[in-house]
Image (spheres, rainbow, N blue to C red):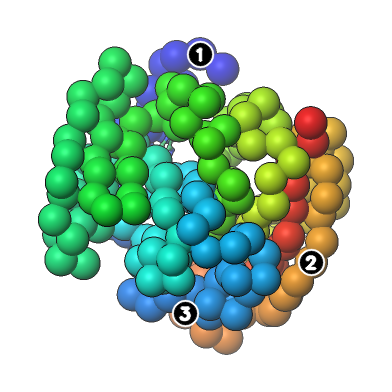
Amino acid sequence: MTDQVMQEELNFWLQRWENHEIGFHQNAFNPWLVKHANQELGVQGNNVFVPLCGKSLDMLFLLHQGYSIIGVDISRRAIEAFFEENNLSIETVIEHHFGREYRCESIRLFAADIFDLPEEIVASADSFYDRAALIALPEVTRISYINYFKRCLHNKPGLLLTLAYEQEVMPGPPFSVTKEWLQKQEAIDELHIIEQKNIIDDEPRFQQKGLSELYATLYRMTYCL
Ligand code: SAH
């Protein structure tokens, strides 16, 4: 992947945040996270890594549950909005060579390209929560993303939420990611379906694009050593 392609992908997201085109953002906690976090993400006090976090309220839920958060998103706007909209005052801002870190109580959010985030930061997490992150990326980047996690998050338990649908009918993002695709990835070790549902009836946005089925799946997964 050339730097130029990568930069175009990042610009696409930065532009979406600038233009408030953030249909992926949910105004409520993810119900499957609420149901399964304590069982799957380890004991309270654990550090949960939230890749491509946007301003997800799920981070607030995890904080309320007693977890610490490490998040990363390319958009400063997204991260600053997370603090502002949830009345959390930023205690420290640190300028790193790879991006900007914002800290508040048990949260460290990095405004950076995930591929620039030093691996030891991710490796300090105990588990991870991936919603609309892996499926936000086109296949080539998605494979780099999986291999990055294999290097720094192997053997840690995590929750992965995906969507699967007929890719020919609608271009991503979000991209369709099936269980078969995930199973083919050598970097992925354990993969277990916890919940699955066709959610098309609740998704007019996707109906308008011509989809008749949209499967949401929650997996328990680990990356290989
Ligand atoms: N997980 C969040 C946001 C999902 S949308 C939620 O559930 O709401 C995907 C997010 O990934 C966007 O906020 C985008 O800015 C971010 N992103 C895309 N590519 C990235 C990269 N290479 N590094 C860091 N963030 C990235």
Circle 3 Cα neighbour tier, 10 Å, few/some/many (<14 / 14–19 / ≥20): few
Label of residue 193 in the image: 2
Give how far apart the Cα atoms at labels 2 and 3 are: 25 Å
Residue 43, percent from left and from top: 59, 63
Is residue 205 positioned above or below 132 on the image?
Answer: below
Asked if residue 22 lies left or right of residue 70, the reply is left
Residue 131, percent from left and from top: 53, 58
Give how far apart the Cα atoms at labels 3 and 1 are: 36 Å
Residue at x-position 82% and y-position 61%: 192
**Viewer-nearest residue: 41 or 171:** 41
- In the rendered image, which quarter is residue 195 located in? bottom right
**Viewer-nearest residue: 77 or 6:** 77
Q: Are marks 3 and 1 in contact (CB under 8 Å)?
A: no
Circle 2 Cα neighbour tier, 10 Å, few/some/many (<14 / 14–19 / ≥20): some
- The residue under label 1 is which amino acid type? Thr
Asked if residue 175 lies left or right of residue 45, the reply is right
The residue to which callout 1 is attached is: 2
The residue to which callout 3 is attached is: 204
Residue 82, percent from left and from top: 25, 57
Nearest to N terminus: mark 3 or mark 1: 1
Label 3 CB-ligand 1 distance < 8 A: no
Nearest to N terminus: mark 1 or mark 2: 1
Label 2 CB-ligand 1 distance < 8 A: no
